[in-house]
Each structure stands twice: as structure tokens, then as C-alpha cells.
Amino acid sequence: MSSSTVSSINYTSSRIYVYVGLPIIIFGVLGGILNIVVFLSLRIFRQNSCGIYLITISFVNIIQLLAGFLYLIFVRGPLIDGIVINVGNCTIRVYLVQICALISMSCICMALLDQYMATSKYKRLQDWSHRKIAYHLCIIVSLFWIVCCIPHLIYYNAVVSSVTNIAVCVITNSIFQSYVNRFYTPVLLNTFPLLFIITFGLMIYSNMKQMSYRTAPLVRRQHEIQITSMILTQALISVLLITPFFILTTLTNYEMITMQHLFLFFVVVHTIVCASNKNDRRGSMMSHEILHGRTTWSSKGKVIAGGHGPGNALNQLNSSYGIFVQLNDDLFISDYSNNRVVKWEKDATTGILYAGGQCGIDNHDHLCHPTALTFDREGTMYVTVENGTNGGVVRKKSGATTTEMFIMTNSSLYGIVWDEKEEFLYLGHHREHQVSKYTKDGQFVAIVAGGHGRGAALNQLDYPRGVAVDQDGSVYVADSNNERIIKWEANAKEGVVVFGGHGIGNRTDQLNVPAALLRDKTGTIYVVDERNDRILAVSPGIQDATIIAGGNSQLNRPIYLAFNSKLDLYISDTDNFQIQLFPVEDAPSGAGINILISNWRLLFCFLTTIVLLKTSVSV
């Protein structure tokens, strides 16, 4: 290669290091810091096992940028002339870079494994997805790579290249060079993570497609989707970048790839992943905004089921009650007066009979006046029914053609909810003025709220309806005739009023027959204020609620509500014989600018990678 060609390559390389390297460092460090801030500031992510892996990845990638790439910009770029690579900074820099690269890749693989277990339908696997396990694994893996990378401190030295006349860090031991060429680069950094990422990425995707049902509303469903999306995005980007790098190293027999380019590869992976996480951070902030009451919904609802007057045709409803939304936005409705549960697929103009259609006492295939309903992770439907003074819970397993009686009671049941781990089922006994707890096998455990007859005392309930439960086992009850939301902590002798209790009225601190309610992990309670024809959002510790839908003649005796994964609000508009959808409002316009910038970063970093790799082959 002529000296002019070498000079041209060196000149181009120095400009790339500065004009491409500086934006990578700036956006990469800021992106990493933003990731850490988001995950540490939000409890729902901070306590998630996968969040620990993502925090670790962001942290070590920041170290990569500052410890290695910033130094290379000064050495290879024209900013500061005369900086010399000596043995000390050469070995330490390579050592830190390799440790961080291996920890980062290991955490991506462990995060994929964690998400595979978290999205599995088997509880035994779900139990292994735990933040304490993730915490200990991050420490163990970090210590392991710190020890394993010690040879990099020993066998790397600064040598002046005879081609570029620039001091570079190279391996001076032939045995270690053989190890790097034959195992470290092709297997440890390429083949193994590539196969692992592809395998578990596909397995997670398969789990997510099968995991159509979720019992916990709103933020829990939202953050599960966000975290899984982050990990799958990391997996996809890693596959796209590892594959050409692996092909290049194979074709060149590993002789022409310097550690600077290997380091650049991992830096660009990190930067692109930070850019690709833009929507995930937006979703995280959206969940954060709910806590502060800034999330809003459209003031105009859209009819998505029914709306053709009362009747028993499949495009009609007759006193709809409970609703449940799958991750794919398919909607299940308990059609009270038609004694059935109907399924409305997204954008459908008519429903599909899912269960029931007739009312009978002895035939379990019949549903008598179905009210509240929910699903478990395995896709089994649980719906409360009533026939005169008798009531119970009927279930239909995924793929089954018939229903079966799960729990039999002598009371109407208007509230049903699983706890977060789906170990216990909570039922609101409407006419017995209590909330009871059952095992996952349908065995009675205890009365957890009320149980002292009908009344307004703090140890009593008066026709309870909606029920919610938090991660601590505290039960929240829509105490309909007492016009209040009351909280019963686990094993408490009486409840505490968290909202309402100021008599019947339409002020924002009053209720008029509270019906269904949902509670998210931020503590915000969403309650259907039936006779006021509105939906309220109650922030923790605040007695002045926010009207998020209705209150303006749009609704007529709403009874139930649900949210999909995008936080769109579904309302069972009972006396209008329809289900209405109120879309969540778009995020602030500033988010669009950030997305545009991030997309340019993606393209810029990818083109930079191609240029650098081509330069390596030419040299």
C-alpha cells in the first residue's frame, strides 16, 4: 500500500474519531445516565430483576466510553498532538474495555434469560425471575470477568505500527494471540452470545404471543411490555451488529482487527441501543406521569362494542357489566342480561359468543347474569355469576369448549381480582357485605374485609362491589352504599377510608355509588362513579379526585373499566348498551424532537461502523 494511501486513511480515520466519536460519547453517556435515572427513580422498574441488568449495562457502558473511547479520540484525532500510548495506559485501558464489554454482553444474555422466565406460564420458572437473584448474578459475573481478563494486563503492550506509524495496543504473546483469535473473539464475543440472543429472543417472543392475558391492570402490564420490548430491542440490535462483525473477523482470519475496532463495535452497540430505547423511556415517563396526574385521555369516546340498542344479537349488548382487555386489544364483555360472555376482536363490528348464552342452575355451560370477570396468566377466564340468592365463580380454561363451576356461594359477587402472584383470588360478596379470599384451587381462606354485617362503621361494608389488591396484600373496596373507597390492610380488624365518605354528591371529593375500581402500582385508584356517570382518578393521600372521563352526559350508568397496554381507557357504558374507548392523549411534542434526533444517531452510528470496518480491511 502506498504511503499516500496510508496517509489518506490515517487522515480519514482521525476525522472519524473526532466528528463521529464525540457525538457517540456525548449521546452515549447522556443516554446511559438517562437510563440509570429512569430505572432508579421508578419503583416499578427499580424492583424489577431485568431493570437491574439494564442498570448494570448502562453503567459499564459509560465506563467503556470514558475509559477507552475518549482516550482514542485524543490519540487518533487531531485535537491534541503528541499524546503517546505507553504500556501502563495501554494495558489498563484494554483491561477496562474488555471487562466492561464482557459484563455488558453477559448482562444482555442474563436479561434475556430473566425475561424468558418472567414471561413463562410456569410459576416455577417465574419464581427464578427475582431482583435478588439478578443482583447477585451481576456481582458474580462482574467478579468473574475481572479475574478472567487479567491476561489482558499481562500480554498487551504499546507497539508502533509499521503501516500507520501510530502506537497501538497489541498482543505480544503468541499463545494468548492464538487464544484470542481462535476462542475469545469468534466464540466468546461472537458465536455464543449470538446463538444465545437469537434462541432466547425467539423464546421470549413466543411467550409474549401466548401471554395474552393479564390480571393486573395498567402500570404493571405497561411496564412488563416496556421492559420486554427493551430487551428484545437490545437482542435485535446485537444480532444485527454481531453478525457482520463475526463474518468480517472470520474472513480476515482475525489478523486485521485491532482492539480499537473491537472496542468501537461495543461502543456503537451501546449507543444504538440507547437510541433505540427512546420509545421505551417515553413509556417509562408516561407511567411516571400517571403518578403526578398529568396523563390525560381524550374527552370524546369511541363506541367499540354494542351501540345498537339493547338486544341479543351478536352486535348488541344488554346491560354489559365486566370487561377485560387482552394485550392484543381483544375485548371480553360479560353481557349481564343476555347471560353470556362475548369476545370482540379489535376493530370488529360484531362479537363472538365465548361462553354461556342461557341461564340454568344445573348446567355449568350456562351463565346466569355474569358480572365481573378476569383472566389468569394461563388464559383461564373467571367470571362471577348470580341466580337469585345464589352466586359463584365459573371458569373456562383456555382452549376449552365448556365452562365449569369453580366456587359456589350463596351471595351475589360483584368484584373479582387475583393478587399479583396469582396465589389468591379475592371476591366481593355483595349481599354478605364482605370480601373473601380464596386459594388458586378455589378453597376459602378468610374474610379480609367487612364480615360484621351491613353498616357504615370502619369494620363494616354496605354492598361492596369493585375489589383491588396491592403487592402487600392490602384490599381496596368500592363500598357502594357508604359512598367510599376503603382500604383493609392484611389481617386488619377494620378499614381506613382512602377516598369519599362525604355523603352522596357530585363534588370531586364525593361519590354516588362507586362500582368497579382498579389500582396501579403507583397507588393511583381509578374508580367508576356510577350514578355520577364519570370515571375518577384518585392519587394517594389526596381527597380531591380528577375526572378522567364522563361527567358530561357521555356516559349512562357506567359500571366497569379497563385499560389496555397503551393506557387507553375502556368503559362499560351499561345503560347505553355499549363499550366506549377513550384513547390516551399523545405525549408532549418535545418527545417527537427527541425521537428525530435518536433516529439520526442510529443511522449515523451504523454508517460509522461500516466505514471503520472497511478501513480495517483496507489496511
Image: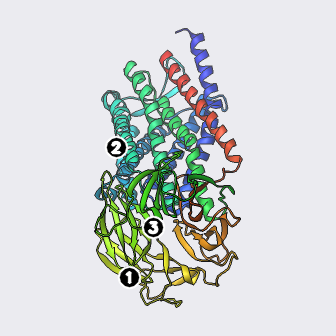
Q: Which residue is mark 1?
A: 447
User: Which residue is drawn at the image coordinates 58% and 65% (left, top)?
Assistant: 575
Report crowding for label 1: few under 14, some 14 to 19, many 20 or more residues within 10 A (C-alpha).
some
Query: Percent x, y for residue 475?
Result: 46, 76
Report crowding for label 3: few under 14, some 14 to 19, many 20 or more residues within 10 A (C-alpha).
many
Q: Earlier in the sequence, mark 1 or mark 3?
A: 3
Q: Amino acid at mark 3?
A: Thr
Instruction: Give how far apart the Cα atoms at labels 3 and 2 are.
Output: 61 Å
Label 1 SS: strand
Label 3 SS: loop
Q: Amino acid at mark 2?
A: Cys
User: Which residue is drawn at the image coordinates 38% and 82% (left, top)?
Assistant: 447
Q: Which residue is mark 3?
A: 371
Closer mark to the observer between disc 1 and disc 3: 3
Left/right of residue 456 with respect to residue 149 in the rendered view: right
Query: Percent x, y for residue 280?
Result: 55, 48
| Color style of the picture | rainbow
Report crowding for label 2: few under 14, some 14 to 19, many 20 or more residues within 10 A (C-alpha).
few
Residue 140 is marked as: none
The answer to whether residue 566 shows anywhere in this view is: yes
